[in-house]
Amino acid sequence: MEVILLERIARLGGIGETVKVRNGYGRNFLIPMKKALRATEDNKKIFEERRHIIEEQNAKARKEAEIQAKKIEGLSIKLIRQASQEGKLYGSITVRDIADALKEAGHAVPKSQIVQTTIIKTIGEYPVRITLHPEVTANVKLDIVRVEAEAA
């Protein structure tokens, strides 16, 4: 299936590019999420007419994401969890836990924008990447501690 991208998508292409994707990916994700249009002649004409509007919206969203990234970049978040003497957590830290901690710190970030590269099952410090826009990311440091005394 060929689609016209309405926004930049990592490892796929930029705005306005016509790319070939698998049918399920295009039909079940890209088109319903308004990230792409089917690459028909009518849709190509419609896209070219609306291209400047789409690019303006993308630039506005990127600027807002850059402002938010400056606020979040380098932020250190502490989570207090129960753990064994060896430092193994009873459970694991999920994206939901990170989103809740960011919300408590005053930064509302949807769970879909948080990229957790490793499974967190022990106490320590972990880097977390937040993708605020396809072209804008911020890095946050997550510090997992066992008890209140270690948090201070």
Image: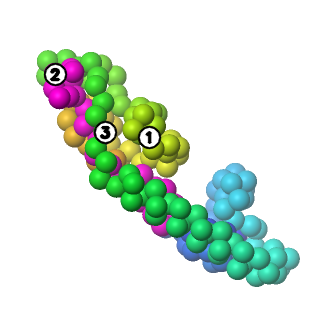
- The residue beneath circle 3 is 77
Query: In the rendered view, would you say 55 is above or below 68?
Result: below
Left or right, residue 34 beside residue 81:
right
- The residue beneath circle 2 is 149
Task: Tell me, yes or no, if residue 33 can be seen here.
Answer: yes
Q: Position of residue 26 (x, y in %)?
A: 68, 59
The answer to whether residue 149 is magenta is yes
On the rendered image, what quadrant is the N terminus found in? Answer: bottom right
Q: Amino acid at mark 1?
A: Gly
Mark closest to the chain's N terminus, 3 or 1: 3
Magenta residues, start to end: 130-152
Q: Amino acid at mark 3?
A: Ile
C-alpha distance separating marks 2 and 1: 24 Å
- The residue beneath circle 1 is 106
- Please rate how many residues cluster around mark 1, counting C-alpha atoms within 10 Å: few if below 14, some from 14 to 19, many from 20: few
Q: Position of residue 124 (x, y in %)?
A: 20, 35
Residue sitting nearer the eye, 89 or 58:
58
Mark closest to the chain's N terminus, 2 or 1: 1
